[in-house]
Image: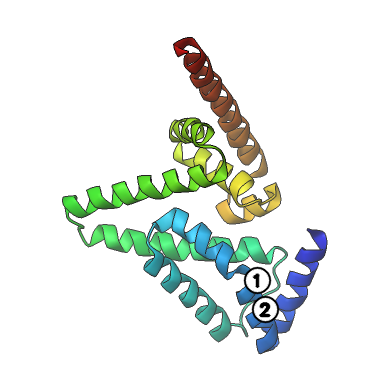
Amino acid sequence: MANSSQNDVEDWLSFLEGNETSFIKIYEKYYQDLFRFGMRISYDSDLTKDCIQDMFSNLWNKRNTLTEVQYVKAYLFKYVSRLLNNQIQKNIKSKIKAKELLQHAELIFDFESNLISETSQFEKSKNLHEALTKLTKRQREIIKLKFFEGFDYEEIIEITGLKQKTIYNIAHEAINALKKTILFVFVLTINTL
């Protein structure tokens, strides 16, 4: 991980100097991860792709004013998260009809269900999904970043802007809540056999 992070910093510095090859390297290395992450925010592939393209376009155009970053991946995730959330807020302010909101909610549920189903056996996925839905939005975000995206705590700090102690507390509470919920579902399943 440290070696990859060091390579990222070298590519970033080279990109800041106008090296197009280094810029393309960063783009190709993180595009798929950014897309998967963005889909968890927007559930809209076109919007996600547009925001990723806008981000890379902005980075290239503003490379002369950018500075060195220690965690390139975390920087990119935070940037695309901000773009997506801003765009989502604009869409909300444009008064989306109630029917469209309901359809969007169904798409969100379907996407999360598919994601969980792919990670393990059907029954475990069902239990995990139920447990995740009982977490707060912030707890789900931290769990997804840590365990689904594989970020370390320093990168999660960069992405969320939260303090280290806050992230540790949220993660600890979320893990405890997941354990209790999954254990409860397991006990209910055994009792029904």
- Label 2, on which residue? 25
Q: How is the image coloured?
A: rainbow
Amino acid type shown at disc 2: Lys
Which residue is drawn at the image coordinates 63% and 77% (left, top)?
A: 66
Amino acid type shown at disc 1: Lys
- Label 1, on which residue? 29
Residue 84: x and y in percent read 42, 63
The answer to whether 11 is drawn above or below residue 187 in the figure is below
Residue 65: x and y in percent read 61, 81
In which image quadrant can residue 33 be found? bottom right
Which residue is drawn at the image coordinates 42% and 73% (left, top)?
A: 50
The answer to whether 97 is drawn above or below residue 5 in the figure is above
Does 32 sit left or right of 22 as displayed?
Answer: left
Secondary structure beneath label 2? helix
Which of the pair 138/41 is nearer the observer? 41
Question: Residue at the right extreme?
Answer: 3
Crowd class of label 1 (few under 14; some 14 to 19; many from 20; radius 10 Å) = few
In what quadrant of the picture does the N terminus appear? Answer: bottom right
Residue 188: x and y in percent read 47, 15
Which residue is drawn at the image coordinates 68% and 47% (left, top)?
A: 153
Question: Residue at the top extreme?
Answer: 191
